[in-house]
Amino acid sequence: MEEDRMMILKMLQEGKIDAEQAAKLLEALESGKSFEKEKKEEKESKTGRWFRVRVSDAVTGIQKTNIRIPIGLMNAGFRIGAQFSPELAGMNSDEVMSAIKTGKTGLIIDVIDDEDNEHVEIFIE
């Protein structure tokens, strides 16, 4: 964006365009920047912002854990969670990160650990 501004100013300096044309080009450049920012904000509002891990008893359905962290901390949180839950340790974190980057929301992982009678659910909200 800064390079475009400099190119317009250089064209003005060299006399290839006049001040009015330069002003119009700079204005168009700024409005394009605003449009890109709006589109980015719109996309972010449609994607999930929270990563939730819910662990419940597979037999009774009683919740044992319900953790909600910001997506920005998800990568570190996934590695920490894998230390405490063997089911998560075997999962591919790239698959989860891909779901986050593509804007997927809702339930992304649903695992039942028969050995510990735990139901682990991972959501993007």
Image: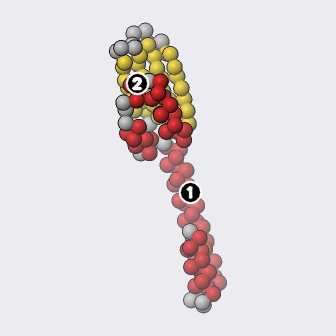
Residue ID at (44%, 13%): 57
Residue 5 visible in image: yes
Circle 2 is placed at which residue position? 86
Tell whether 123 sits left or right of 91. right
Q: Secondary structure at mark 2?
A: helix
Quarter that holds the N terminus: bottom right
- Amino acid bearing label 1: Lys
Q: Is residue 13 above or below residue 70?
A: below
Residue ID at (56%, 79%): 7
How would you rate the neighbour count of disc 1 (Cα within 10 Å): few for under 14, some for 14-19, many for 20 or more?
A: few
How would you rate the neighbour count of disc 2 (Cα within 10 Å): few for under 14, some for 14-19, many for 20 or more?
A: few
Q: Which residue sits furthest top?
A: 60
Residue 118 x, y percent position in the rendering: 41, 16
Q: Splitting the image into 4 quarters, where does residue 91 fall? A: top left
Specify which label sits upstream in the sequence, 2 or 1. Answer: 1
Q: Is residue 77 above or below residue 43?
A: above
Circle 1 is placed at which residue position? 37
Residue ID at (55%, 65%): 32
Q: Foreground: 30 or 20?
A: 30
Residue 111 x, y percent position in the rendering: 37, 23
Tell whether 31 sits left or right of 48. right
- Amino acid bearing label 2: Pro
Q: Secondary structure at mark 1?
A: helix
Tell me whether circle 2 and circle 1 mark residues in contact (CB < 8 Å): no
Q: Gap between marks 2 and 1, in whole Å?
A: 41 Å
Q: Splitting the image into 4 quarters, where does residue 60 fall? A: top left
Q: Which residue sits furthest left?
A: 114
Q: Splitting the image into 4 quarters, where does residue 56 fall? A: top left
Residue 97 x, y percent position in the rendering: 43, 41
- What coloring was used for the rendering? secondary structure
Foreground disc of the pair 2, 1: 2
